């Protein structure tokens, strides 16, 4: 097979674009805030290493490094942060059971009408963005990807675990905005495994 590769030029004006970079911190990083560029919104120094596992450090180009907190995750952020904390501690058996539950609920050959995960996720995203939670959704997705990279990197590339955690977190993030069926479609696998 022959493939022709051509260079792609970046857009001429990138000033309006924002880049989010996820960084893994060394295990021995400690809280100097000013030395590492970490700090809270007031400029006071905070620890470069998150104090709880659900918080992740992200860096946006041109902005100081800050942690994803419950406040970043919207009005239901405390519940989303609790889910992320628990996701850090998942055992291999729990990961496997979550993937199985998602498999038969979300990717079965003949899903029940109205139980499409794609439709439920789209509805949750639309409602969340319409109510001004776009930043919280981005913070959740960033936190999930970081969590997977730092704690479950040995999972296979085709793992459904990131989707299970992201959809469960999204369901909690917009729980007050979506109908119960949409919530259950997104949160069902997590509830089935973690609450039994």
Image: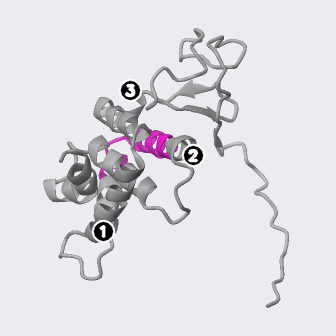
Q: Residue 176 carries which label?
A: none
Q: Residues within 10 Å of mark 1 (few under 14, many from 20)?
A: many
Q: In terms of sequence position, does the residue under pointer 3 or pointer 2 come before the other? A: 3
User: If you read the primary sequence from the N terminus, does the residue marked by circle 1 or circle 2 appear first?
Assistant: 1
2 left or right of 102 in image: right
Can you identify the residue that label 1 sits on? Answer: 106
In this orientation, which residue lies closer to the viewer: 79 or 189? 189
Q: Is mark 1 on a helix, strand or loop?
A: helix
Q: Is residue 9 above or below residue 27?
A: below
Q: Where is residue 123 in the image (x, y as percent from the top left)?
A: 29, 59
| Magenta segment main secondary structure | helix
Q: In which quarter of the image is residue 113?
A: bottom left
Left or right: 157 with respect to 114?
right
Residue 190 is situated, as x and y percent measured from the top left of the image, at: 28, 51
Residue of label 2? 149
Name the quadrant containing residue 76.
top left
Magenta residues span 127-144
Label 1 – label 3 distance at C-alpha: 30 Å
Please name which of the two marks, 1 or 2, marks the residue nearer to the observer. 2
Q: Which residue is drawn at 62% across and 26% down?
A: 65
Q: Which residue is drawn at the image coordinates 51% and 47% (left, top)?
A: 152
* Quadrant of res 61: top right
Sort mark 2 into few (<14), some (14-19) or many (20+) by Cα contacts within 10 Å: some
For mark 2, give the secondary structure: helix
Residue drawn at (43%, 27%), measured in percent from left and top?
Answer: 69
- Residue 71 numbered mark, or none: 3
């Amino acid at each position: 097979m022959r493939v022709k590769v051509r260079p792609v030029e970046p857009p001429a004006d990138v000033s309006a674009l924002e880049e989010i970079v996820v960084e893994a911190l060394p295990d021995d990083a400690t809280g100097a805030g000013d030395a590492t560029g970490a700090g809270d919104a007031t400029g006071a120094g905070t620890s470069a290493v998150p104090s709880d596992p659900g918080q992740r450090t992200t860096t946006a180009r041109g902005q100081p490094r800050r942690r994803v907190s419950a406040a970043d995750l919207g009005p239901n952020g405390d519940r989303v942060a609790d889910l992320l904390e628990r996701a850090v501690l998942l055992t291999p058996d729990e990961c496997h059971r979550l993937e199985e539950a998602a498999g038969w609920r979300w990717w079965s050959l003949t899903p029940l009408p109205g139980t499409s995960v794609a439709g439920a996720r789209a509805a949750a995203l639309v409602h969340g963005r319409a109510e001004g939670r776009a930043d919280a959704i981005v913070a959740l997705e960033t936190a999930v990807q970081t969590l997977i990279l730092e704690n479950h990197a040995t999972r296979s590339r085709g793992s459904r675990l990131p989707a299970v955690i992201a959809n469960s977190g999204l369901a909690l993030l917009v729980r007050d905005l979506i109908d119960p069926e949409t919530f259950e479609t997104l949160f069902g696998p997590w509830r089935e495994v973690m609450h039994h």
